Image: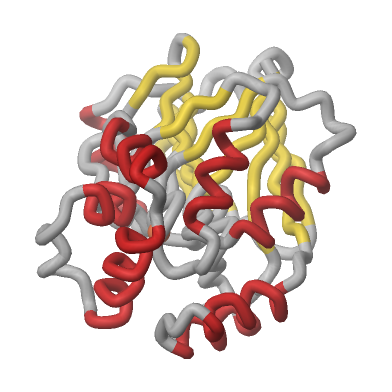
Amino acid sequence: MKYLILTDIHGNSDALEAVLEDVSDEGIESVLVLGDLVGYGAGPNEVIETLLTLPQPTVVVRGNHDKVVATPLEDAHFNAIARAAVRWTAAQLSPSNLEYLHELPQGPLEVEPGLFVCHGSPVDEDEYLLSLDGASFAFSVHPGRRIFFGHTHIPTLFASDRGGLSSIELDGDAETIPLTGKRRYLANPGSVGQPRDRDPRAAYFIYDSETDRLDWRRCAYAIERAQRRILDAGLPEILAHRLAVGI
Ligand SMILES: [Fe+2]
């Protein structure tokens, strides 16, 4: 099965549309979305409606922003900017889209044997999985062989085998990573809608479970349009500015 793997779209419908256009000739058979569909960006309804109308079967797990937007009064632990975006998003969403967020399942979900999707980590949907220690713990308690996660907005790849644990760098324009059967992986493509690795382009994976080939890609999109919509919506200006620098 050939998967498109997206995470942390964060209401950035301009970035989502650019990615879908980018992969239109790739023969994608299924789309996996690792949470945080909304929050920060000015197109939350458009993002949900685009995902709902994808021709491919789509598997979506909730992210922390999806959970908080759908559950009023649970945003106390968010910082002021994230909280402003959560409240704006909740007020904008149509009742059916709000209900859609409310119904999203919590990860990890097993998509096919050994292949899992989750938001933060397979042991805690709110965990920021950035370190070898965190990856080591996740591998020790979860049986997944190919575990895709998001939440940090930083492209990340951990590999584990009998020889130990390693971190594989993801940077530049694109990388093809031939996974090996003896190793287990935790992989985060980085964010579609609010990258934080100083590259403002949308990030995503294409994963072919037949060949075990993982492609990491970056895709330019109309950042100025997404920024204009954020400013026009009255969302905090920093949410527009950071898109141009990828932080
Ligand atoms: Fe996020």
Render colour scheme: secondary structure
Q: How many marks?
A: 0
In the rendered view, would you say 133 is above or below 171? above
Task: Give me the residue at 15% from left, 56% from top.
Answer: 72
**Can you say whether 151 is above or below 178 in the image?**
below
Q: Indicate the position of residue 163 as horizontal and vertical percent values.
A: 44, 34
Residue sitting at the far right: 25
Residue 134, percent from left and from top: 28, 50
Instruction: Give the quadrant of the N terminus.
Output: top right
In the rendered structure, the answer to whether residue 165 lies left or right of residue 26 reads: left
Instruction: Name which residue lies at 66% across and 30% down.
Output: 54
User: Is residue 19 rendered to the left or right of residue 80?
Assistant: right
Q: Residue at x 65, y 52 (%)?
A: 16
186 or 194: nearer the viewer? 194
Taking the spot 56% from the left edge, 41% from the top edge, the residue there is 49
The quarter of the picture showing ligand 1: bottom left
User: Foreground residue, 224 or 131?
Assistant: 224
Query: Residue 201: horizontal and vertical position, in percent?
Result: 70, 67
List the single residue furthest toward the top.
Answer: 113
233 up-or-down from 100: above or below? below
Can see residue 157? no
Task: Give the image quarter of residue 92.
Answer: bottom left
Where does the image place residue 102, in percent across and percent down from the top left? Answer: 27, 38
Residue 179 picture quarter: top right
- From this viewpoint, is residue 178 visible? yes
Q: Nearer the viewer, residue 99 or 182?
A: 99
